[in-house]
């Protein structure tokens, strides 16, 4: 696998609570955009579902769309993300969602991390490679059973 590294900056964001729970827990939906520099030259858009605890820490999951270039290839792919906020900064684990790549990034697969120690900037790592053969449906799977009547 090839390792892409660099920095990112949050360019916009918003958050809306959708449920308050006993014990100071709060559920929110957050969304935003980012710009990635370094080995990944791209823009990102993220949607998070977040659980805040009374101590201001949080656990969150989301999907992040990346559009740009990595390793000399251009296109779009989607990351599944799982993160933890300790009250001052966040650490996120990424996994490329299989078959989400488009353009020259079709077949991308991989995983990585994103770390924001506080503020609107941070660093990322993404270890990635590409499937050697695109997945295709077998000819039998694409047959319409209604056409094989005698």
Image: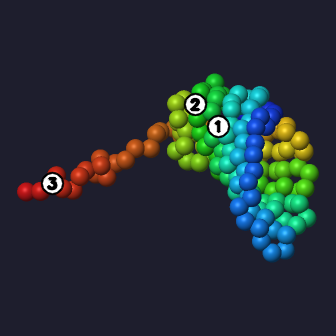
Q: Residue at x 72, y 38 (%)?
A: 33
Q: Is residue 20 above or below residue 123?
A: below
Quarter of the image with the N terminus in it? top right
Residue 83 visible in this rendered orientation of the protein:
yes
Distance, label 2 to label 3, CA atoms, is 39 Å
Q: Position of residue 79 (x, y in %)?
A: 64, 46
Q: Of residues 130 and 142, which is closer to you in this image? A: 142
Q: Earlier in the sequence, mark 2 or mark 3?
A: 2
Distance, label 1 to label 3, CA atoms, is 43 Å
- Reading the image, the residue beneath label 2 is 75
Q: Position of residue 37 (x, y in %)?
A: 76, 29
Q: Residue at x 53, y 35 (%)?
A: 102
Label 3 secondary element:
loop
Asked which quadrant contains residue 112, the reply is: top right
Q: Residue at x 52, y 30 (%)?
A: 103
Q: Earlier in the sequence, mark 1 or mark 2?
A: 1
Q: Earlier in the sequence, mark 1 or mark 3?
A: 1
Number of disc labels: 3
Label 1 secondary element:
strand
> Disc number at residue 113?
none
Instruction: Point out the frontmost of discs 1 and 3.
Output: 1
Are there few (<14), some (14-19), or many (20+) residues within 10 Å of tag 2?
some
Asked which quadrant contains residue 36, the reply is: top right
Of all residues shown, which one is farthest toward the left? 150
Q: Residue at x 71, y 61 (%)?
A: 18
- Reading the image, the residue beneath label 1 is 66
Are there few (<14), some (14-19), or many (20+) residues within 10 Å of tag 3?
few
Q: Could you tell me if the residues under marks 1 and 3 are in contact, i.e. CB atoms within 8 Å?
A: no
Distance, label 1 to label 2, CA atoms, is 8 Å
């Amino acid at each position: 696998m090839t390792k892409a590294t660099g920095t990112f900056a949050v360019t916009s964001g918003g958050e809306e609570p959708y449920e308050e729970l006993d014990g100071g827990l709060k559920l929110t939906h957050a969304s935003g955009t980012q710009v990635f520099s370094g080995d990944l030259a791209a823009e990102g858009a993220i949607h998070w579902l977040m659980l805040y605890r009374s101590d201001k820490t949080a656990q969150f999951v989301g999907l992040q769309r990346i559009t740009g270039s990595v390793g000399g290839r251009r296109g779009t792919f989607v990351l599944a993300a799982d993160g933890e906020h300790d009250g001052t900064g966040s650490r996120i684990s990424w996994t490329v969602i299989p078959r989400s790549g488009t353009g020259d990034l079709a077949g991308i697969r991989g995983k990585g991390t994103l770390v924001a120690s506080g503020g609107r900037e941070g660093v990322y790592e993404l270890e990635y490679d590409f499937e050697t053969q695109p997945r295709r449906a077998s000819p039998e799977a694409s047959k319409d059973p209604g056409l094989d009547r005698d």
